[in-house]
Image (cartoon, rainbow, N blue to C red):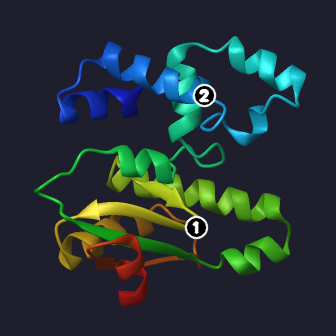
Amino acid sequence: RKFLNTVSVRGGVPLGQLVDEFVVRVRSAQSMPVAFAPGSEILTRRYRGLSAEEKARLAFVDPNTGALNRRGFEALPADPARPLVAQISVEGTKWANRAGHTVGNLLYRAAAQALRGASPDVAKLGGDFAVRVKDQAELDALLAKAQAAMPPGIALTGGVGRTFGEAGKAH
Protein backbone atom coordinates (compact mmCIF):
# COMPACT_ATOMS: atom_id res chain seq x y z
CA ARG A 1 0.00 0.00 0.00
CA LYS A 2 2.82 2.39 0.90
CA PHE A 3 4.58 1.66 -2.40
CA LEU A 4 1.43 2.29 -4.44
CA ASN A 5 0.80 5.56 -2.61
CA THR A 6 4.39 6.66 -3.29
CA VAL A 7 4.10 5.86 -7.00
CA SER A 8 0.71 7.58 -7.13
CA VAL A 9 1.96 10.79 -5.50
CA ARG A 10 5.28 10.98 -7.36
CA GLY A 11 3.77 9.99 -10.69
CA GLY A 12 0.67 12.14 -10.39
CA VAL A 13 -1.57 9.16 -11.14
CA PRO A 14 -4.75 8.60 -9.09
CA LEU A 15 -4.30 5.60 -6.79
CA GLY A 16 -7.43 3.86 -8.10
CA GLN A 17 -6.23 4.10 -11.69
CA LEU A 18 -2.80 2.83 -10.70
CA VAL A 19 -4.25 -0.19 -8.88
CA ASP A 20 -6.57 -0.95 -11.82
CA GLU A 21 -3.62 -0.87 -14.24
CA PHE A 22 -1.54 -3.16 -12.01
CA VAL A 23 -4.45 -5.60 -11.66
CA VAL A 24 -4.80 -5.81 -15.45
CA ARG A 25 -1.08 -6.59 -15.74
CA VAL A 26 -1.14 -9.09 -12.91
CA ARG A 27 -4.15 -10.92 -14.32
CA SER A 28 -2.43 -11.50 -17.64
CA ALA A 29 -0.63 -14.83 -17.84
CA GLN A 30 2.66 -13.15 -18.75
CA SER A 31 2.88 -11.06 -15.60
CA MET A 32 1.28 -13.49 -13.15
CA PRO A 33 3.90 -14.50 -10.56
CA VAL A 34 5.39 -17.89 -11.38
CA ALA A 35 4.29 -19.33 -8.02
CA PHE A 36 0.70 -18.68 -9.05
CA ALA A 37 0.87 -20.11 -12.56
CA PRO A 38 -2.29 -21.97 -13.63
CA GLY A 39 -0.73 -25.39 -12.89
CA SER A 40 -1.17 -24.88 -9.15
CA GLU A 41 -4.89 -24.87 -8.38
CA ILE A 42 -4.62 -24.12 -4.66
CA LEU A 43 -2.27 -21.18 -5.14
CA THR A 44 -4.30 -19.93 -8.09
CA ARG A 45 -7.47 -19.90 -5.95
CA ARG A 46 -5.63 -18.05 -3.19
CA TYR A 47 -4.30 -15.57 -5.73
CA ARG A 48 -7.75 -14.92 -7.17
CA GLY A 49 -9.06 -14.27 -3.66
CA LEU A 50 -6.58 -11.47 -3.06
CA SER A 51 -7.57 -7.83 -3.24
CA ALA A 52 -6.28 -5.67 -6.08
CA GLU A 53 -3.73 -4.05 -3.74
CA GLU A 54 -2.47 -7.45 -2.57
CA LYS A 55 -2.06 -8.60 -6.17
CA ALA A 56 -0.19 -5.45 -7.10
CA ARG A 57 2.06 -5.91 -4.07
CA LEU A 58 2.93 -9.44 -5.19
CA ALA A 59 3.95 -8.12 -8.58
CA PHE A 60 6.24 -5.37 -7.25
CA VAL A 61 7.66 -6.59 -3.92
CA ASP A 62 10.28 -9.22 -3.15
CA PRO A 63 8.45 -11.78 -0.98
CA ASN A 64 11.49 -12.64 1.15
CA THR A 65 12.60 -9.14 2.12
CA GLY A 66 9.55 -6.94 1.64
CA ALA A 67 11.71 -4.59 -0.45
CA LEU A 68 10.73 -3.63 -3.98
CA ASN A 69 11.71 -6.13 -6.66
CA ARG A 70 13.20 -5.19 -10.05
CA ARG A 71 9.76 -4.49 -11.53
CA GLY A 72 8.83 -2.30 -8.55
CA PHE A 73 12.12 -0.39 -8.69
CA GLU A 74 11.78 0.24 -12.42
CA ALA A 75 8.19 1.42 -11.91
CA LEU A 76 9.27 4.21 -9.56
CA PRO A 77 8.96 7.60 -11.24
CA ALA A 78 12.20 9.41 -12.05
CA ASP A 79 13.46 11.63 -9.24
CA PRO A 80 15.62 14.53 -10.50
CA ALA A 81 16.93 15.05 -6.95
CA ARG A 82 18.29 11.48 -6.94
CA PRO A 83 19.36 10.71 -10.52
CA LEU A 84 21.89 7.95 -9.77
CA VAL A 85 21.47 4.31 -8.81
CA ALA A 86 23.46 2.67 -6.03
CA GLN A 87 24.22 -1.03 -5.95
CA ILE A 88 24.51 -2.28 -2.38
CA SER A 89 26.02 -5.64 -1.49
CA VAL A 90 25.64 -7.55 1.75
CA GLU A 91 29.08 -8.95 2.48
CA GLY A 92 28.87 -12.37 4.10
CA THR A 93 25.84 -13.79 2.30
CA LYS A 94 27.87 -16.56 0.66
CA TRP A 95 29.11 -17.60 4.10
CA ALA A 96 25.59 -17.36 5.52
CA ASN A 97 24.16 -19.47 2.70
CA ARG A 98 26.68 -22.21 3.50
CA ALA A 99 24.89 -22.53 6.83
CA GLY A 100 21.64 -22.91 4.88
CA HIS A 101 19.56 -20.68 2.66
CA THR A 102 17.27 -19.93 5.59
CA VAL A 103 20.21 -18.16 7.26
CA GLY A 104 21.00 -16.28 4.05
CA ASN A 105 17.35 -15.24 3.71
CA LEU A 106 17.37 -13.93 7.29
CA LEU A 107 20.48 -11.92 6.49
CA TYR A 108 18.81 -10.41 3.41
CA ARG A 109 15.74 -9.56 5.50
CA ALA A 110 17.89 -7.83 8.11
CA ALA A 111 19.69 -5.88 5.37
CA ALA A 112 16.42 -4.86 3.73
CA GLN A 113 15.02 -3.65 7.04
CA ALA A 114 18.19 -1.68 7.81
CA LEU A 115 18.25 -0.14 4.33
CA ARG A 116 14.53 0.76 4.44
CA GLY A 117 15.30 2.65 7.65
CA ALA A 118 17.68 4.77 5.59
CA SER A 119 15.69 4.98 2.33
CA PRO A 120 12.09 3.91 1.62
CA ASP A 121 12.76 3.10 -2.06
CA VAL A 122 15.18 0.22 -1.53
CA ALA A 123 14.85 -2.72 -3.91
CA LYS A 124 16.34 -6.21 -4.02
CA LEU A 125 17.75 -6.99 -7.45
CA GLY A 126 19.18 -10.47 -7.61
CA GLY A 127 21.65 -10.87 -4.77
CA ASP A 128 22.11 -7.14 -4.19
CA PHE A 129 20.06 -4.11 -3.29
CA ALA A 130 19.44 -0.91 -5.25
CA VAL A 131 18.43 2.58 -4.20
CA ARG A 132 18.35 5.94 -5.94
CA VAL A 133 20.80 8.54 -4.64
CA LYS A 134 22.07 12.02 -5.46
CA ASP A 135 25.77 11.10 -5.28
CA GLN A 136 28.38 8.91 -3.60
CA ALA A 137 28.25 11.05 -0.45
CA GLU A 138 24.53 10.34 -0.06
CA LEU A 139 25.19 6.61 -0.53
CA ASP A 140 27.95 6.72 2.09
CA ALA A 141 25.58 8.39 4.59
CA LEU A 142 22.84 5.88 3.78
CA LEU A 143 25.24 2.95 4.24
CA ALA A 144 26.48 4.32 7.57
CA LYS A 145 22.93 4.64 8.87
CA ALA A 146 21.94 1.17 7.65
CA GLN A 147 25.19 -0.40 8.89
CA ALA A 148 24.38 0.71 12.43
CA ALA A 149 21.29 -1.52 12.31
CA MET A 150 23.11 -4.60 10.96
CA PRO A 151 24.43 -7.53 13.00
CA PRO A 152 28.14 -7.30 13.92
CA GLY A 153 30.48 -8.69 11.27
CA ILE A 154 28.09 -8.13 8.35
CA ALA A 155 29.07 -5.22 6.12
CA LEU A 156 27.06 -3.27 3.59
CA THR A 157 29.12 -1.90 0.70
CA GLY A 158 28.13 -0.10 -2.45
CA GLY A 159 28.89 1.90 -5.54
CA VAL A 160 27.07 4.51 -7.61
CA GLY A 161 26.38 4.81 -11.33
CA ARG A 162 23.82 5.97 -13.87
CA THR A 163 22.50 2.40 -14.05
CA PHE A 164 22.51 -0.58 -11.69
CA GLY A 165 25.11 -2.34 -13.86
CA GLU A 166 27.34 0.72 -13.94
CA ALA A 167 27.04 1.02 -10.16
CA GLY A 168 28.11 -2.61 -9.81
CA LYS A 169 31.25 -1.97 -11.86
CA ALA A 170 32.06 1.08 -9.72
CA HIS A 171 31.62 -1.03 -6.61
What is the spatial separation of the Cα atoms under label 1 and label 2, in whole angstroms?
41 Å
Which quarter of the figure has residue 145?
Answer: bottom left
Instruction: Residue type at mark 2: give it.
Output: Ser
Disc 2 designates what residue?
A: 28
Instruction: Residue type at mark 1: give it.
Output: Pro
Q: Which mark is residue 117?
A: none
**Where, quadrant-wise, is the N terminus in this rendering?**
top left
From this viewpoint, which residue is outermost toward the left? 81
- Tell me: 66 left or right of 33: left
* 138 and 77: which is toward the camera: 77
* 141 and 136: which is toward the camera: 136
Asked whether residue 75 is in view, the answer is yes
| Position of residue 56 measured from the top left corner of the image (x, y, whole percent) | 51, 28
**Residue found at x 23% / y 24%:** 13
Circle 1 or circle 2, nearest the eye:
2
Who comes first in sequence, dot 1 or dot 2?
2
Answer above or below: position of 109 versus 28.
below
Which quarter of the figure has residue 41?
Answer: top right
**Residue found at x 17% / y 28%:** 12
**Where, quadrant-wise, is the C terminus in this rendering?**
bottom left
**Is label 2 in a helix, a strand or a loop?**
loop
Answer above or below: position of 32 versus 140.
above
| Position of residue 140 measured from the top left corner of the image (x, y, whole percent) | 28, 76
- Tell me: 59 left or right of 63: left
**Is label 1 in a helix, a strand or a loop?**
loop
Asked whether residue 68 is in view, the answer is no
Q: Which mark is residue 151?
A: 1
